[in-house]
Amino acid sequence: MAHLPLRWPAEAVWEAVAPLLAGFSVEVLPEIDSTNTELMRRARAGHGDPVLLVAEHQSAGRGRLGRQWSSRAGDSLTFSLGLPLQPASWSGLSLVVGVAVAEALHPRVGLKWPNDLWVDGRKLGGILVETASFALADAPRQTVVGVGLNIHRPPGEGLATPPASVDELLPELDAPAVLARIAAPLVAALQAFETAGFEPFRARFEARDLLRDRVVTLSDGSTGTAHGVAQDGGLLVHTAAGMRVVHSSEVSVRPAP
Ligand code: BTN
């Protein structure tokens, strides 16, 4: 069931985030193709001011690995945060986003490497991180962090695993309240990552790592046992050929049945 109309806390989010991020603004749109696509378009056009863009509906939402991301207005939270970042290393960035969102939400939210949010064996939400450079190689890159969360249970037809929703954990929160809860911690985590990298987040990821000690199948057909994450955020998988560090750009991972 769709829960409309929504009252978005743009001012409260701005007040919480603006002290951390100069020039920050919040925009809420009834519909757009994809909040990530829009912020990447703006970045390529040279607009790199920090912004949080919320869409009540996306007509062409995108997931990782070229997948579609579909959601229904009122039943989901879909937003992207765009900000310039210049970390010494980009390794582990998407895991940091997962840690920040999971910690801001609920102790029962787990992370399926690299950054899927799961509850009780079902997907609660997903994260799509993209970057665009403005000009020089060693200048900050515009970083677009897209987050999609099921707030109320969407129809699960056609999905191998029925999805989870935030209202199972926090029935009192609607999409605007969930946004208000995660926006500032997400910005703070990205800034901590820019300063100190992935290492301070490693134990926090591992505390929610759903794949640990599970047999996993990689999309290249190989299997092994997951053993947490390496310093760079790669998934450690013990295979017949020895320990392998898997990076998300190479493969998708699923727990073996
Ligand atoms: C995944 O699980 O594959 C990642 C899903 C990311 C979805 C969010 S919704 C807001 C933002 N805009 C998009 O088009 N995608 C991300």
Image (cartoon, rainbow, N blue to C red):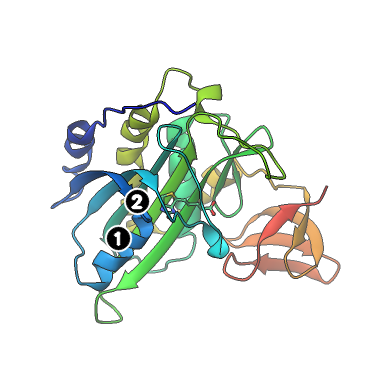
Residue that appears at 67% across and 43% down: 210
Vertically, is 39 above or below 189?
Answer: below
Q: What residue type is labelled 2?
A: Ser
Q: Under tag 1, what secondary structure?
A: helix
Q: Which amino acid does label 1 sit on?
A: Leu
Residue 39 is labelled as: 1
Location of residue 140 in the rendering, given as x and y in whole percent from the top left corner? 27, 70
Q: Quadrant of residue 82?
A: bottom left
Q: Does the residue labelled 1 lie within 8 Å of ligand 1?
A: no
Q: Do the residues labelled 1 and 2 touch (CB within 8 Å)?
A: yes
Q: In which quarter of the image is residue 61?
A: bottom left
Location of residue 39 in the rendering, given as x and y in whole percent from the top left corner? 30, 60
Dot 2 crowding, Cα within 10 Å, few <14, some 14–19, many 20+: many
Residue that appears at 80% across and 67% down: 222
Residue furthest out toward the left: 23
Location of residue 113 in the rendering, given as x and y in whole percent from the top left corner? 61, 52
The reply to whether residue 149 is visible in this rendering is yes
Q: In which quarter of the image is residue 230?
A: bottom right
Location of residue 173 in the rendering, given as x and y in whole percent from the top left corner? 41, 23
Q: Does the residue labelled 2 lie within 8 Å of ligand 1?
A: yes
Residue that appears at 48% across and 22% down: 170
Q: Under tag 2, what secondary structure?
A: strand
Question: In this rendering, would 223 be left or right of 110?
Answer: right
Residue furthest out toward the bottom: 136
Question: In this rendering, would 216 be left or right of 114?
Answer: right
Residue that appears at 74% across and 63% down: 218
Residue 80 is labelled as: 2
